[in-house]
Structure formats: C-alpha cells, structure tokens
Amino acid sequence: MELIIISGRSGSGKSTALHQLEDEGYYAIDNLPASLLPALVAETPSLSRRDSAGIAVCIDARNAATELGNLEQILGSLPASVRLRVLYLDADENTLIQRFSETRRRHPLSSDSIPLAEAIRLEREILEPLAASATLTLDTSQMSIHELRDAIRQRLVGAVGELSTLIQSFGFKRGVPADADLVFDLRMLPNPHWSKELRLLTGRDPAVCEFLESHAVTHQLFGDISGFLDRWLPHYASSNRSYITIALGCTGGQHRSVYMAERLHRHCASGDGPVHLRHRELQ
C-alpha cells in the first residue's frame, strides 16, 4: 500500500495538498497523531475503499513534540510493504505572515506571549524531523492554489517507481527556490533586457531565442548543463531518488533562464520518467 505524509508550516498549503490527493482517490486524514500511524496502516483494509489509491495523512505542529521527536522510530516500525513518501511544504516567512494576515486565522502556536513571527520560526524547529524525512519538498511562496494543486498532481500522483524531474526558471532578484536540488546560474549570458526591442518579451519568444543563440557562449553553456544532466540524472534515479528539481536562474527570470529551461525541457523529455517545466516569474 502507499502512504503519503503531508507536513509543513501553517499557511504553506497543506490543506490544499491533502484535498488534491483526496480528489485523486486517496483516503485523506487531517491532523493524525504520529503515534497512530502503525495502527492506521494495520487497519487499512477496513478504512480504505477497494479502489483507493492509498492513504494521505497530514501530520504537523499540532502533534505533540514528543511524538514528532519519535518520528524516525515510528516510521521505522511500519511494515516493509508500505511505500512511504513524505511531502514537506514551506514558504518564506514574509509570505506566511501575509497569508495569515489575509485570512485572519490564528496560528496554532501563537498566543498572547508568542507573536505570529516568532510562532512561525518556532514551528520550523518543531517540524525539523519531518522536514529531514521529506522525499519531496515544495516551496509554495510563489505558487497560487491552482499551481500547487497542479504540482501535487504532476509530482506525486502516478510518479511511483521513476524519477520525476522539474526544470524551473527563476530570477535571482526574488531569491533561489528553496526546494531546488541543482542550481545553475545563467547570468554570464548576454542579457536581452538591455535591448529595447527584447525587454518586454520572454525567453519563449523567437526574437529572444534568436538573440541568445547568436552567441556561442549560449550553446557552450547548454552543452555543459545538458551533458551534466545526461551523465548524473541516471545516478539519482538508481539511488532510489523519486524527485529532483533543477533550477535555472538569471537576474529577472524573464529571458535567459526561461530560454534555457525550455531548451533543457525539450532535451530531457526524451528520457525516462516524467519531466515537468515551470517558469516561476512568469506564473
């Protein structure tokens, strides 16, 4: 059977992820005490529908700290027949604060003596055992609800037994994606931003592609990055890795990184396993 544990800081999108998996046919349970996982697995035949895709459980800071501290032992006690995946969601602190301000919901760890910002930082410490156990980490800072649901569907559902690759463009001025496994800096390439004719276009537009491809350094860099991925991605797959995120950055995330992400996506899509593409700054 398949068991997916969803965790992360409050406001990162855990409920959205759980609802998406429920829509995909998983038996979904929110706020389960971690100590009950073995009993839940044992009762699976009576709990889940015959056509259920598996079980999705949300475990977060609402659990007792002692249970989270014993998480490694709890997970280790699960039967070998259980295929376990842990999804950890997070976002930067400013985004989490903004989300709580917009919804006017109370943070589960905040109180008269613990302000919101401090509660958010404390929650990171409490959830460290789950973050360390994660097989897939998603940074939802720049994601809408629809984008998160798409990411769950693409990267979790139907990705059993193969390496799922995400190629993502981004702009350094908004920070490196927190969930990136490999980061390539493209800021040494000629910048179309300084051309008035190209400034308002993106790396998807033919004029920008033609500009970048007119420089030999673009082809040299693509050859180096694609060669690295051709050589090493199979090693990630053979080491039982299920997910990898490849982030390509330029200054603004509009031209060079978008162009290179598109080109690498076409290159890698011919291999084994699903390959997804996301342009963070174009969403």
Image: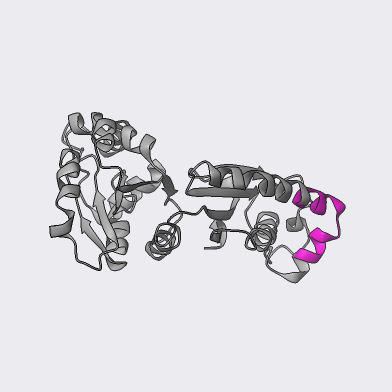
Residue at image point 81% right, 54% down: 219
User: What's the magenta region?
Assistant: 209-222
Residue at image point 24% right, 45% down: 59
Q: How is the image coloured?
A: one colour
Query: Which of these two is toward me, 192 or 247?
Result: 247
Q: Quadrant of residue 15?
A: bottom left
Q: Quadrant of the N terminus?
A: bottom left
Query: Which of these two is toward me, 145 or 1?
Result: 1
Q: Position of residue 175 (x, y in %)?
A: 54, 44
Query: Which of these two is toward me, 1 or 217?
Result: 1
Residue 33 in sight: yes
Q: Quadrant of residue 118?
A: top left
Q: Position of residue 202 (x, y in %)?
A: 67, 64
Residue 31 in sight: no
Residue at image point 59% right, 52% down: 170
Magenta span: helix, strand or loop, mainly?
helix
In this image, 283 relative to 227: left or right? Answer: left
In this image, 204 relative to 241: left or right? Answer: right
Q: Position of residue 61 (x, y in %)?
A: 23, 39
In this image, 250 relative to 120: left or right? Answer: right
Q: Is residue 220 magenta?
A: yes
In this image, 49 relative to 3: left or right? Answer: left
Q: Is residue 232 above or below residue 264?
A: above
Q: Is residue 130 above or below residue 192?
A: above
Q: Is residue 227 magenta?
A: no
Residue at image point 71% right, 69% down: 205
Q: Position of residue 26 (x, y in %)?
A: 27, 62
Q: Quadrant of residue 55?
A: bottom left
